[in-house]
Amino acid sequence: MGMRRARFLACIAMAAIVLLAPPSTCGVAGHSRGLRPGRSAGAGGAGDPPPLFPVNATRAEMIERQFMEWVRYMGGLRHSTFQHALARAFPSYSLVVDKNPAFGDFTTIQAAIDSLPVINLVRVVIRVNAGTYTEKVSISAMRAFITLEGAGADSTIVQWGDTADSPTGPKGRPLGTFNSATFAVNAQYFLARNITFKAVALRVSADNAAFVGCKFLGAQDTLYDHSGRHYYKECYIEGSVDFIFGNALSLYEERKPLFR
């Protein structure tokens, strides 16, 4: 009986070691989840893929390649951040916003967002038809997987008039920069395409957000790239003082002129 108990305890100990062992750290760190570690030069056969990082790559080159691999990984269907990647890569359903109620499901962007479940786990595309939408928009933290698609950056515009000094905060106090944004993104996996954000234009406080073909127009504090990892492609960002600020890790690719 003592021998059997000892073997049982040994099996439990081995299982605990396997379950609690930390994952391998031989790959790249940070936001590179899903990447295979690069192989050293000369390793493997002639048919092996080239190493992720050449031996003579500079640190800046390594960081840039790592980030681009992460961008491709997040946009692909093979990542395992969630069990059912396909359900989140393709839209489960679409909503239409139009200033004319006869042509859309909602007349404001915020109303369309508020119609989603408080905890949203499927990709939803909100198509915003041409027009100027004067409203303050906020996406709460658990409403993830939203795609906001405009009719064109020059055709679909979201604007509001708050500033950091606006006396509309609690008890009549100034709002402050954080709360003055026209459009605030607090949920992960947000994507915006072909739309313009005006005034103290946008604050992004969530991970894994991307903006393609968008415009951000303002003077001071135009784009508050607050926190998380973000990707901006073919975007125009206009301002004069501190027009891009924050602590996010972001990549700006094929950007247009950034200041006036």
Image (tube, rainbow, N blue to C red):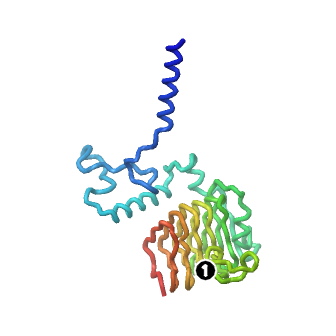
Given residues 5 and 231, the one toward you in this image is: 5
Judged from the image, the secondary structure of the residue bearing numbered disc 1 is loop
Residue 100 in the image, given as x and y percentages of width and height: 74, 76
What residue do we see at 45% from left, 43% from top?
23
In the rendered view of the protein, which quadrant contains the N terminus?
top right
What residue do we see at 60% from left, 80% from top?
200
For residue 162, which quarter of the picture?
Answer: bottom right
- Position of 207 with respect to 58 (left or right) is right
For residue 206, which quarter of the picture?
Answer: bottom right
Tell me if mark 1 has few (under 14), some (14-19) or many (20+) residues whose alpha carbon lies within 10 angstroms of its own: many
Inspect the image, locate mark 1, and give the three-letter code of the amino acid beneath it: Val
Residue 156 in the image, given as x and y percentages of width and height: 62, 77
Residue 140 in the image, given as x and y percentages of width and height: 67, 63
Please state the total of marks drawn on the protein image: 1
Residue 73 in the image, given as x and y percentages of width and height: 46, 55
- Position of 26 with respect to 256 (left or right) is left
For residue 179, which quarter of the picture?
Answer: bottom right
Q: Pick out the residue farthest to the bottom.
A: 260
Q: Pick out the residue farthest to the top.
A: 1
- Asked if residue 47 is positioned above or below residue 119 in the image, the reply reads above
- Asked if residue 32 is positioned above or below residue 131 in the image, the reply reads above
- Position of 250 with respect to 179 (left or right) is left
Q: State the residue position of label 1.
A: 200
What residue do we see at 50% from left, 63% from top?
229
